[in-house]
Each structure stands twice: as C-alpha cells, then as structure tokens.
Amino acid sequence: MCHAAKVDGSVDRQEQDAILGRLGDVTEEELDFVRKELEAPLDVTQFCRSVSDDLAESVYAFSIMAIELDTLKEAAYLACIIHEKHI
C-alpha cells in the first residue's frame, strides 16, 4: 500500500491517513516503520521485480485499495506488477 501510494510522486495527508487507518491495532514502532516507508524513495521497476510470485496477486490487490487510479504513473505501476509477475 505504501509503494502504491508513492508512485504518483507524492503521498498526501489523505493517502497517509487512509493507509494508517487500515493498520488496526499496531505498536508505535510499527507506525514509525510505515511512516518511514511512506517517505522513502521508490524504484517502481525494482519493487515489481522483487515481489515474489506467490505474493503478486496480493500486492496488486492491496495496491488497488491504496490508490485512486487517476494518473498514468499509477496505471504504469499496476501494469508493471502484472507484466513482471504475469498475473
């Protein structure tokens, strides 16, 4: 979800709140980890290649949940997952 939110170049407050709100009961350490992931740069191609075959469908599904598909960068990210993992 974090990576999907970042593909358009920025993660706005609404996207952050949506992701953090879906975490449920987590520790402060876990929240800090997610916040750092949201701030870290993303190499989309490398990420898509790093997704294991058995997790590809889940990554795609969670990505769909995390974004509002309204930019070409987001569409390219989803296409990258499909292309790299043949889902």
Image (spheres, grey):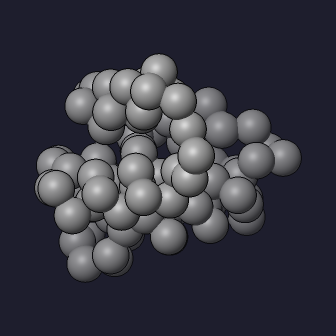
Q: Is residue 76 visible?
A: no
Q: Nearer the viewer, residue 84 or 62?
A: 62
1 lies above or below 42 = below
Residue shown at 42% from the left, 33% from the top: 31
Expressed as whole percent of the image width and height from the top left, the position of residue 2 reads 41, 45
- The residue furthest top is 29
Q: Nearer the viewer, residue 79 or 60?
A: 60
Residue shown at 41% from the left, 44% from the top: 3
87 displayed left or right of 72 = right
16 lies above or below 52 = below
68 displayed left or right of 10 = right
Expressed as whole percent of the image width and height from the top left, the position of residue 64 reads 50, 70
Determine the image quadrant of residue 45: top left
Residue shown at 25% from the left, 78% from the top: 70
14 displayed left or right of 38 = left
How many numbered marks have been drawn onto this rendered protein structure? Answer: 0
Q: Nearer the viewer, residue 86 or 19?
A: 19
Q: Which quadrant of the figure contains the C terminus?
A: bottom right
Expressed as whole percent of the image width and height from the top left, the position of residue 22 reads 50, 59
Residue shown at 21% from the left, 64% from the top: 14
Expressed as whole percent of the image width and height from the top left, the position of residue 24 reads 56, 53
Q: Is residue 61 visible?
A: yes
